[in-house]
Image (cartoon, coloured by chain):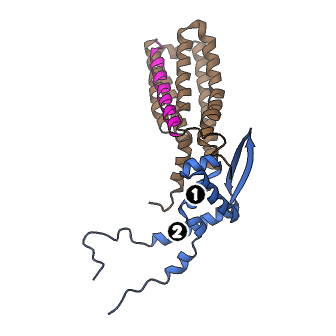
């Protein structure tokens, strides 16, 4: 055992900042929006708009919910480098997804022939995206979220029914909501200006 | 009858430990600030479990020693205090850590094993 386990201390600080459940709610709502876009043509535009709004909404919620209760912190260069690696990886993955989407729209024959394989591949790709988030952001629960959402996407493709997306999205969003409730109970907002700097 | 004499060679190493950092609350503060770039007052309260008064008092001592830089501002009407270690604070903490680790590394892992007898 190290005398002063600084790595563990840093990890504890990092994780405490991400135990508000907001990221889980974001991913859950993203999956639910995908479901809505798939089943309700009239709300498709609203669902797509909601998907783009979720990122800024997360930043806003962090600012209004997490920071006033938990305080703010600037993490070190290693965390910033890990975030950069994640962004690069997800950008590459998005580019690959777009290429596959273009091939699908273009009616590539191999996609129709290998429907099961392609469905499994899409689910696996989604899992890999979440696994990247879990690995580089050091949030182990995202492996489980990825497993659930990846399985839901594969099931949706195979069954040609978006219901698994609704189930998976709801489970993830409700899990996030439960975390948020615990977070709000554990870290009440300090009254007035108390707690952030009078001396 | 021969009596056990304390090991005098350990004394200089122990005496060299920075007592300002060695106090548990300040040690926690220094360690937390060591692993991040900067943190505000509330974040440090949450991480260390110290009260506002305690945190202020310890921060004052660390600031006086030149280990911590305190930046005060207002966010709207609320005070907002951001703290970070100064370069001398970082090196003092690194030195403290090294000393403690080398001191404790020489101790036996388990002195209270069953069957051991220290009062011969």
Residue furthest out toward the left: B115
Q: Which residues are magenta?
A: A161-186
Q: Is residue A188 above or below residue A151?
A: below
Give the residue drawn at x 61%, y 22%.
A99
Q: Colour of chain B?
A: blue
Left or right of residue B86: residue A114: left
Give the residue drawn at x 56%, y 45%.
A14
Q: Quadrant of the N terminus of chain B?
A: bottom left
What element does badge 2 sit on? helix
Chain of the residue under the numbered disc 2 shown in the image:
B
The x and y percentages for residue B28 are: 55, 57
Residue A116 visible at all: no
Q: Quadrant of the C terminus of chain B?
A: bottom left
Marks 2 and 1, how far apart in space? 13 Å
Give the residue drawn at x 59%, y 42%.
A70
* Mark 2 neighbour class, 10 Å CA radius: few under 14, some 14 to 19, many 20 or more: some
Tell me which label, 2 or 1, sits earlier in the chain: 1
Is A173 magenta? The answer is yes
The x and y percentages for residue A132 are: 54, 36
What element does badge 1 sit on? helix
Chain of the residue under the numbered disc 1 shown in the image:
B
Give the label on residue B31, or none.
1
Is B66 magenta? The answer is no
* Mark 1 neighbour class, 10 Å CA radius: few under 14, some 14 to 19, many 20 or more: many
The x and y percentages for residue B109 are: 38, 68
Give the label on residue B100, or none.
2
Q: Colour of chain A?
A: brown
The x and y percentages for residue A135 are: 52, 40
- For the residue pair A175 and A119, the one nearer the viewer reads as A175
Give the residue drawn at x 59%, y 18%.
A101
């Amino acid at each position: 055992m190290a005398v002063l386990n600084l790595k563990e201390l840093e990890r504890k600080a990092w994780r405490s900042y991400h135990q508000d459940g907001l990221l889980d709610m974001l991913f859950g709502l993203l999956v639910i929006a995908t479901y809505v876009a798939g089943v309700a043509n009239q709300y498709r535009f609203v669902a797509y708009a909601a998907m783009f709004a979720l990122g800024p909404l997360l930043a806003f919620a962090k600012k209004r919910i997490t920071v006033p209760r938990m305080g703010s912190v600037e993490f070190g260069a290693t965390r910033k480098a890990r975030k950069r690696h994640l962004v690069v990886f997800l950008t590459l993955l998005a580019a690959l997804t777009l290429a596959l989407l273009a091939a699908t729209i273009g009616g590539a024959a191999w996609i129709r022939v290998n429907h099961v394989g392609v469905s499994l591949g899409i689910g696996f790709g989604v899992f890999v995206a979440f696994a990247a988030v879990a690995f580089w952001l050091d949030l182990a629960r995202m492996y489980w979220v990825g497993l659930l959402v990846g399985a839901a996407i594969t099931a949706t493709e195979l069954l040609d029914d978006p219901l698994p997306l609704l189930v998976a999205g709801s489970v993830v969003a409700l899990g996030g909501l439960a975390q948020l409730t615990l977070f709000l109970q554990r870290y009440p907002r300090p009254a007035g200006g108390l707690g952030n700097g009078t001396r | 009858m021969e009596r056990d004499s304390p090991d005098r060679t350990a004394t200089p190493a122990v005496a060299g430990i920075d007592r300002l950092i060695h106090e548990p609350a300040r040690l926690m503060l220094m360690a937390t600030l060591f692993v991040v770039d900067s943190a505000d007052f509330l974040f440090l309260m949450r991480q260390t479990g110290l009260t506002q008064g305690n945190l202020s008092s310890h921060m004052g001592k660390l600031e006086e020693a030149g280990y911590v830089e305190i930046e005060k501002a207002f966010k709207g009407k609320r005070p907002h205090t951001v703290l970070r270690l100064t370069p001398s604070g970082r090196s003092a903490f690194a030195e403290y850590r090294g000393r403690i680790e080398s001191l404790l590394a020489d101790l036996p892992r388990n002195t209270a094993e069953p069957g051991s007898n220290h009062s011969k």
